[in-house]
Image (cartoon, coloured by chain):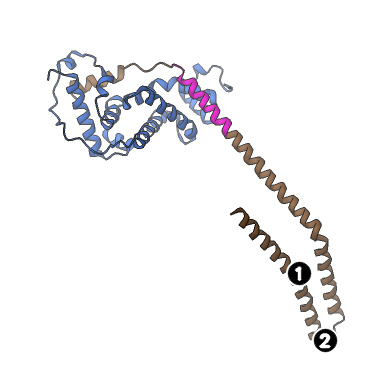
Amino acid sequence: MSSRGFHNLAEATEAALIVAAQARNQAAFSELVKRRQGWARALLRRMCNSHAEADDLAQEAFIKAWDKLNDLETPAAFPGWFRRIAVTTFLMAKRRQKAVFEEIDDASPVASEESTPEAAAGAKIDLEKALARLSDAERLCVTLNHGEGLSHAEIVEVTGLPLGTVKSHVLRGTEKLRRLLEPSQ
Amino acid sequence: MTDFDALLKRSFAEAPEPVDDGFAVKIEHAVARRESALKARNLAQTIGLAAAGAALAYGGYSFYGAFGQELLASAGLEVARAHGALSSAPSLGGAAQNVLHAIGAGLTQILLIAGALAGGAVAYRATQD
């Protein structure tokens, strides 16, 4: 595989790698994958319950990105553009598994929000274990909201779910996490 | 934002990312295979188009070899007949009749050939279906 156009791929900026990959430079794309694989796999691992499934979806997302790279208008938009591909790949996989994202489970009431001793103390929490206890939809919305910093409107745009559904999933998911992480409450 | 929300965001931000355990290499190979398959498909398409073009040219050449001279000869004969009819016409009505006759005779041959081609095309299409 050639790395033509670069003296040292490892030192190239992400923007330069993206532009080269858009010109079908496989070495540049490979370097881009090396730099972004951690973020992409972590994002999908939080959304999925299984690491193996998440890695398969991450692979699928990167290959889709390679195929559609010329649709990306500016290199700076890559993270948001790739996140959308990853979320769409995840949603398509869940639809194949007949997962339901728009129904909201009303069985678990939402408690009032208040500060916790751990939070006040700045304690770290076992995020992965706690996320595994949420529904697929709650995990998706909580990850995008708290993990990726997307607003409710941005989550609507990325997932295609109705705004009310997104708000409910974020609220309930966050509340479930709070209760899961506070067994004494 | 509550303290818990802040803690949650911090936990997301500080959560360790998976190390590259050969994942990037797997993608690299998958992309390389994809590109090779794409190149092979494009090559097959180009070869197919070239073969189709060559077959068409060969068919046209064979058709010309079999019927071309005869067609040209017939056309020339009809032109000569028409010219003869015009030049030796005793009257305008007779000449016009001869011209029409000549064109009619030529047209019959042209229509026969066109019909044969159309019939062949229909038969070919039927075998393909």
Q: Nearer the viewer, residue A74 or A140?
A: A140
Q: Secondary structure at mark 1?
A: helix
Badge 2 sits on which subunit?
B
Judging by colour alone, the chain drawn in blue in this rendered image is A
According to the picture, the residue beneath numbered tag 1 turns out to be B109
According to the picture, the residue beneath numbered tag 2 turns out to be B91
Residue A144, quarter of the rendered image: top left
User: Do the residues bearing badges 2 and 1 touch, measured as CB atoms within 8 Å?
Assistant: no
Q: Nearer the viewer, residue A38 or A94?
A: A94
- Say if the magenta span includes residue B118: no
- Say if the magenta span includes residue B24: yes
Residue B129, quarter of the rendered image: bottom right
Where residue B118 sits: x, y (%)? 67, 62
Q: From which residue to which does the magenta span run? A: B21-37
Where residue B69 sits: x, y (%)? 83, 61
Where residue A23 sits: x, y (%)? 54, 30
